[in-house]
Image (spheres, helix red, strand yellow):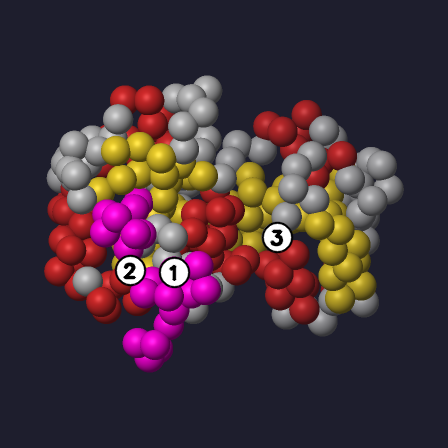
Amino acid sequence: MDGSLSSPLNPAGSTDDSGTVVLALPKGRILGEVGPLLARAGIHPAPDYADEDSRRLRFETDDPALDVVRVRPFDVATFVAHGAAQIGVCGADVLMEFDYPEIYAPLDLGIGRCRVSVAEPAGTAGADDPARWSRVTVATKYPNIARRHFAARGVQAECVHLNGAMELAPSLGLSRLIVDLVQTGSTLAANGLVETETIAHVTSRLIVNRTALKTRPERIGAWIARLRTALASP
């Protein structure tokens, strides 16, 4: 990858206008899991950063050169890819779906463990041989992952793109299958679905804007090193 990557949102791809490094964190479950790791790395955001009811989205830390922003999980990669944030915490599922060349993922943080899986109604699971399919309708927020997965088997996936409530799609006739993120499988079971195949196991990764790393290697590299050390500590 050459060093000329830039973004229309931030041509330098390295910092915001204030010169502060911005760390993008995902809302939801991962925000709670990443807190202890940040603390071990010496990153202490304002206390309300983990309050999902707070209307603030950007938070100072005890380091004046680092701010934290809290965004939707799928948006973390977009903020980092375009240089609006220089580092972030992002699920591997998002990286698989969007495959941003501007993003470097140096650390597996080992949190947010789940999987991207195929599921279908319990009443029809195993009733047909998928090897005989030529096409299948799939409800998912991961159309690229789903298409690649089924294409590798010679099956054309017609994807219905949903951002939530995937579990309803088969019973309402939107799709035959779903491809979704699964943690315990309890939501699938509650909606009459069974997990039939795991596409990928997922954890959260530290991601970095490549241009920021090239233009400010000492500062960005120092944050990577602190988080690597925190991962190694009990």
Please name the residue that numbered disc 1 is placed on.
10
Is 191 displayed left or right of 90 in the figure? Answer: right
Q: Residue at x 38, y 53 (%)?
A: 84
- Residue 232 found in image quarter: top left
User: Front-most of 224 and 197?
Assistant: 224
Magenta residue span: 1-23
Is 193 displayed left or right of 198 in the figure? Answer: right
The percent coordinates of residue 143 (x first, y second) are 65, 56
Q: What's the CA distance linking mark 1 and mark 2?
A: 8 Å
Please name the residue that numbered disc 3 is placed on.
142
Q: Earlier in the sequence, mark 3 or mark 2?
A: 2
Q: Earlier in the sequence, mark 3 or mark 1?
A: 1
State if disc 2 and disc 1 touch (CB < 8 Å).
yes
The percent coordinates of residue 204 (x first, y second) are 38, 46
Can the viewer see residue 171?
Answer: yes
The percent coordinates of residue 100 (x first, y second) are 46, 64
Of helix, strand and loop, which one carries label 3? loop
Q: Residue at x 22, y 42 (%)?
A: 66
